[in-house]
Amino acid sequence: MAKASAKFLRNAPRWSTLCPLLLYVLFILCILVLAFSSRQSKGLVAKNENQPPANSGGDDPAPLVYRKIEESVVNELTAAFSRADSNRDKLLTVQELAKYINFKIREHIDEAIRTNPTMFVEIDHKPRDGLVSWDEYQNYWLREKGIEGDSHMKKSVFDKLDRKVKESIAREKALWMEAARTDPLSLTLDEFLSFRHPESSTVNLLNLVDDILRQFDLDGDDHLTVEEFSDVQTTDLGEGKKFILSQNVRERKEEFTKVIDKSRDGKADRGELLSYVDPRHPRYAIQEASTLFSLADINNDKRLSLNEVLGKSAIFMSSKMVHTAESFHDEF
């Protein structure tokens, strides 16, 4: 028995041989585990990349659209689309879009009129004389932009301002001079509204009515007939002002009868024309909605999906559907 045990011990592999072998096997196993884990994680990443983001609704057939647009833009357009989609069918008709645009226009104009006196009083303080001077406004403007300085800053300081800032100041000054009807150095409360929000000013709209009558009122009776309104070939009112007219005589006659001549007496007076040129008139929203549809309705099904809106994101972001104020200020 003792001899057999001694023989077994002599023939058994030594630890000096087994240890390297075990270490090698463990090393191979570790390599295999790491390789398997890496392959699995790459598969998960690829799967996640092919899925739409959370705000796309999860059933988006074209997820690539979302990856080409900034997340903030997607969020803004998705939110606007959802609010405009009154029947919640995830599609927009031209009527739904026009109704929502008209709501945004009215909201913007009402807000501009409501906040105008507050801003006017805030700026009018040196001296508080019921007028806003250019110096007062420029100081306010620079402060709002986070720029140190005032309207009397030295030329050397002004020259160091960014070129875009200097261009903005020049643009503000040009708009100021256009709004200042009584004194080029100061604005009244209504002139200040014309300066900040020309689309909201009744005086501006009355001036536009005057321009229309001056060009279209052939007999000078201070009224427009359907013939005078329809028999025009130009939309240029001078001084860069534009007036939207239908494209042909038949359409203009129909527009005069159905939209302008509320009294049905065959003539349009100043009150009717004022209502017609007011941006809150539904025709503006209908025209913009129709234009957006013509650009974005790719499949021509008379419906806009969220994907179609996102596909023309730049156009919709600059429209009154999303950025109403900026769109107005680019026009006026």
Image: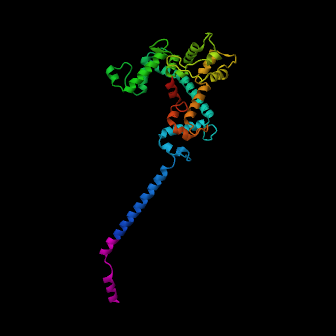
Residue at the extreme right of the image, as rendered: 264
Image quadrant assignment for residue 217: top right
In the image, residue 200 above or below residue 61: above
Q: In the image, is residue 10 part of the stretch drawn in magenta?
A: yes
How far across and down, in percent of the image, does residue 325 sit? 52, 27
Q: In this view of the protein, can residue 132 be seen by the observer?
A: no
Q: Is residue 235 above or below residue 45?
A: above
Q: Quadrant of residue 251?
A: top right
Q: Nearer the viewer, residue 160 or 3?
A: 160
- Where residue 126 sits in the image (x, y, percent)? 43, 17
> In front here: 281 or 223?
223
Q: How is the image coloured?
A: rainbow
Q: Position of residue 292 (x, y in %)?
A: 56, 33
Q: How many marks?
A: 0
Q: Check the picture and name the quadrant holding the N terminus.
A: bottom left
Examine the rendering and report whether any part of residue 33 can be seen: yes
Which residue is at 35% across, 71% downward?
Answer: 22
Q: Position of residue 66 (x, y in %)?
A: 50, 43
Q: Is residue 280 magenta?
A: no
What type of secondary structure mainly makes up the magenta span?
Answer: helix
Residue at x 60%, y 33% (from the top left corner):
97
Image position of 95 with respect to 201: above or below:
below
Determine whether, in the image, residue 261 is placed left or right of residue 184.
Answer: right
Q: Which residue is pictured at 39% across the width and 66% down the height?
A: 29
Q: Nearer the viewer, residue 143 or 192?
A: 192
Q: Check the image and name the residue furthest to the top.
A: 220
Q: Which residues are magenta?
A: 1-21
